[in-house]
Image (tube, coloured by chain):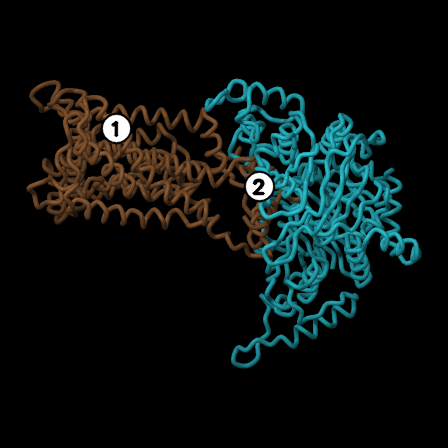
Chain colours: A brown, B cyan
Amino acid sequence: MSAANRGTNADAASEDTAAPPPAPGTGDTTPAPNDSEDRGRGILKSIVTGSSLVAILAVVLSIILGGILIALTDEDVAAAASYFFTRPGDTLAAAWEAASSAYVALFQGAVFNPRADSLALMFRPLTETLTVATPLILAGLGVAVAFRAGLFNIGAQGQIILGAMFAGWIGFSWHLPFGLHLIFVVLAGFVGGALWGFIPGILKARTGAHEVIVTIMLNYIAIYLVGYLLTTPSFQNPGSANPISPRLDDTALFPQILGPQFRLHLGFLVAIAATYGVWWLLNRSTVGFELRAVGANPFAARTAGISVTKGYVVVMMLAGGLAGLAGVAQVAGTEQVLTSGIAASFGFDAITVALLGRSHPWGVFFAGVLFGAFRAGGVQMQTLTGTPIDIVLVVQSLIVLFIAAPPLVRAIFRIDRKKKSNGQKGSKNQMASGGAA
Amino acid sequence: MKLELQGITKRFGSLVANDNIDLVVNPGQVHCLLGENGAGKSTLMNVLYGLYEPSDGRILVDGKPVTFRGPGDAMAAGIGMVHQHFMLIPVFTVAENVALGDEHTKAGGILDLDKTRARIREISDRYGFDVDPDALVEDLPVGVQQRVEIIKALVRKAEVLILDEPTAVLTPQETDELIQIIEELKAGGTAIVFISHKLREVKAVSDVITVIRRGAVVGTVEPIASTGELASMMVGRQVSLSLNKAPATPGETTFTVRNLTVPGPGGQNLVDNISFDIAKGEILAVAGVQGNGQTELTEAILGLHPHASGSVQLNGKELLGMKVKDIIREGVGFVPEDRKVDGLVGSFSIAENMILNWYNEPPFAKGLAMKPAVVLKNAKEKVAEFDVRTQSAEAPVSTLSGGNQQKVVLARELSRPLNLFIASQPTRGVDVGSIEFLHKRIIAERDAGTPVMIVSTELDEISELSDRIAVLHGGELMGVVPGDTSRDVLGLMMAGMTAEEALGQDASVPGERSSATDGRRAAGEEER
């Protein structure tokens, strides 16, 4: 926020007036202390708020590359490749067979399984997908909402754990009537996550401590904290040496919305409601206006009388609270007990989900469902075709890679950048002319 | 060395930044490129300097076609460029900066600066630069830093020197000195390409003026053309350069600043013990070279500097210590110096930017809920009223030109009842056509009885708008003088003299002003 830094921003924009590519070698004489951080933020911003077309193409590209990887590691393909030069068709056929059968199995495990006994069971994979998607969506919203305010919340993992811890404790140690108990559980989960978001938020606001570092460290604290608490009498299941809590009261659990044969629970509806709520908050409320202004341009927000520091605290609490709800979905939905592995890797996958969803609430929702499908279908794929479930991780990672490099995706799909972004470029010129007084 | 550009065209996709431009620069001639921001001046010079490859056309040096693949080629051909933002390393000495990129070494790769020092002294003596090769660049005033840039070019044997908006960062006195230097260089046979959009200095310095509009040459004229003529060529229509505003009718004094001090990070005060008043219906213009405390002064009034001390009272209410939000709600309209950074959220729509500091007030919001329909309706009205050129009020504000962006900021700030209006650099980077409109709106706000404070580094704007002028130097108030104070006195005050000293000096040595200044003064009179 130093004068020098602001000068540099303006200068960078003012170096040319009518030319899209920035002139190399022009810049400022005074190096700005925060320049690199700002640039980093700029990159993050472009990654997280890139175009939806790039996101979709990134998924397509990753699935294609995943298919190639599946083919390359397949034994039949390897066998056919040994006589590739005599009958290359065999290799290609085997490769196609390997990749397509793996993806078919993935689909059957994630959406619809035609070989099941009843119609309801045929759709069981889809409900599994939505069940797994629930914490991903909620935690993804937590990452996304922070990002809209310009903060990179890496701490969803810890926030999920804290949410699960608070919710779980209320769930097994309090005994309340049906309905009321669940409400307390949900609230406690939100509060637990919000607490874990408040810490980096207030440190950022008061001392400028970087939220990425603080949230990463808080993840470790949360992991070891829950591990420790599960060895104490107040959390550990009596009569067991394992670090597992007692089962939550039935009154504290999310009801299964499609009956006992499906794991899909009310938490999914909470995720839908949260998605809508976050959308409304960001786009239709004064709080969201403030948060978006702080995220998009903290200098202008400050000049407009919006408290940037308050925005940081509020958004981190909201982000933590949403991730905390993901913890509730885990402890009161699928797991029903608190364990040290309650968050699995949802907190980290949530970052990917937020990236893929471009930090838009409904984008996050669908990205969460997609990743839920990967997880749910991956198991089926492994059992049916022997394709290691790790390939799903590879596909997920590839998605991030491609989203992080939009020019790569554009180049692969030959999207004419100039044509697509003419308006944007024009704006940059005009912005530039503003600075060149 | 004679430099010719023939039919230079530069396209970026569908955008034609330069359209078939011809230009001849002769030795010992100052050739001025005049055009508004975005007219394509810088693009043309970047083509000439080898930073861009022209889409069409060719460059000839002494009649022979040449191709520049980069600035190195251009420099080797004898073309030097002084960028608007200097390319100097502050912690290096002058000699080190000059040597950079073209270092001489002794045996064993040890840097040999002696030759460079000698060259700097030689050039410095020849043209009267007065530059010490061993001074640290960061210790030098801006005007001297600019000379270091010129020396850098001359050491590399530049015969054509491109100066890109060289006066943007200079005081009027430093500008005079620069003009002197240009005269010397010209006498020595160097060709100068002088890029500017400031009519006055263009007329003072140039031998030939080429006017560029929307990437194309609209005409080449002699400097005897009137400023009005040049302005209409530049803009493409008749513009009135003077407002003929009615004299101010100041009412009661409602805004007082007493002993305002803003401490800086290094212990020195950015704003040092400043006191002044503004009455209703009066414009106080704050003049000064960029970076002399103007920014901090306005920001402190808006409550952006928590450590400011002293007193700032509006209608008897102390503003210092209040939150920015509350100060805005006291009726303070604020146009920040850098609209892109402080005034607008680029990715937000025009409609959202129109309520950026009023978003949670009725009728735009009720409780937590905002009312997008009302926000949009308001924006459409304001877009029409302020003639913001845009396809849609829902377009991101960053898609607008600088002038239209500034209209959005002014529309926002002038649309609510104000008790004080502060505008920093209200027309920076704004095309000449819009300046007229924006100035009229500011005067209208004054005439409606609001105390107005304008901060500007452009003396033209200061004299155009002001009823009284306060001059800042190094964070201190040099004095408050009447609006019709001469540019020379203002220039001396901007360089650090008090009002009394400046008036005294100006009266005592009238004959010693440079001829360039007289030219500038004559141009100024003609304009009025």
Q: Quadrant of residue A398?
A: top left
Q: Chain of mark 2?
A: B
- Residue B392 falls left or right of residue B255: left
Image location of residue B278, percent across then percent down = 76, 37
Question: Which kind of residue does numbered mark 1 sit on?
Answer: Phe
Give the residue drawn at x 46%, y 34%. A291
Q: Is residue B372 above or below residue B94?
A: above
Q: Amino acid at mark 2?
A: Val
Mark identifier at residue A64: none
For the C terminus of chain B, the image quarter is top right
The residue wearing badge 2 is B341
Q: Quadrant of the N terminus of chain B?
A: bottom right
Q: Real-space Cα distance between discs 1 and 2?
A: 44 Å
Residue nearer the viewer, A257 or B213: A257
Q: Quick check: can you spot residue A106? A: no
Left or right: residue A23 versus residue B187 is: left
**At numbered mark 2, what does the secondary structure look like: helix, strand or loop?**
helix
- Which of these two is toward me, A380 or A130? A130
Question: B220 or B334, which lies in front?
Answer: B334
Output the chain of dot 1: A
